[in-house]
Image (spheres, helix red, strand yellow):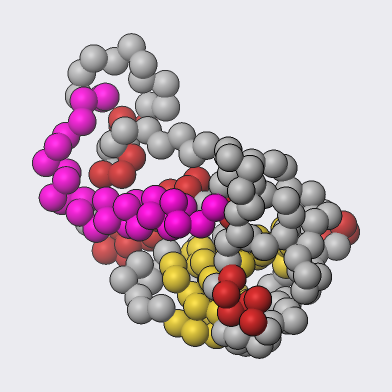
Amino acid sequence: TDDPAINAHREQQKRNFLATLLLSQGTPMLLAGDEIDHTQGGNNNAYCQDNETTWIDWSRLESEASLLDFVRRLIALRRAHPVLRRMRFLHGTYTCPRGIKDITWFTPQGAEKTSDQWMDPVARCIGVLLNGQAGPTVDPRGSLIEDDLLLIILNAHHEVVEFTLPQLPVEAPWTRILDTAEPDGEPQMLYSGAILPMQGRSLAVLSLPAAETAEQ
């Protein structure tokens, strides 16, 4: 299609899917070419295709430079934050000295999700708080690993959702470091309790440095 609105929506959905993959726990499986919009014509099982279906079109390095740059940012973000690469499963049972759990799920109202709310069939927006200072996380040598607090907000609704940042026992501001609706946007500082308008079908990441949290 030549419809600019549809193409813009598709570009944002690409960023959403790539961000969801690279911000997830576990090992991200990125297929070669995904970073430059190599679709394989919709074939998700093309292992036996030795033709244009699987061949990488390297000219896309230029035409898809913005998507490639976004993937590089995601990889750099993942490398910089061990909290995105936990070695153990998260149960929400470990806490830091300030009482913030290792993982907490939030509604758009800034409240922790209840069991009943997980069953809500019309819920389209959710936030997950990852606490890099909670739990005995160590590296292969046994050294303690600490990281920032990261808040990842996902809005699958096609309309804007006003997301209230959860109230935490921390006075320092959050910094929005990634937003798939504004891939080139500048970092934005927000305090707990502030309302962040999440654009339709978008994902945002906010960071609270460990040093600032420890000082409070």
Farthest residue in the top direction?
48
Q: Is residue 74 magenta?
A: yes
Q: Which residue is found at the position 26% from the left and 25% from the top? A: 53
Left or right side of 168 for 62: left
Residue 6 image-quadrant placement: bottom left
The magenta stretch spans residue 106: no
Give the side of residue 206 with respect to residue 79, left or right: right
Give the camera-side residue of 50 and 5: 50
**What residue sits 27% from the left and 63% below the top?**
4
Image location (x, y in percent) of residue 25: 59, 45
Q: Position of residue 209 (x, y in %)?
A: 55, 73
Residue 11 shows in this picture: no
Question: Which span is picked out in magenta?
Answer: 53-82
Nearer to us in this view, 198 or 96: 96
Q: How far across and how far down the image is residue 165, in percent?
A: 65, 79
Image quadrant of residue 55? top left
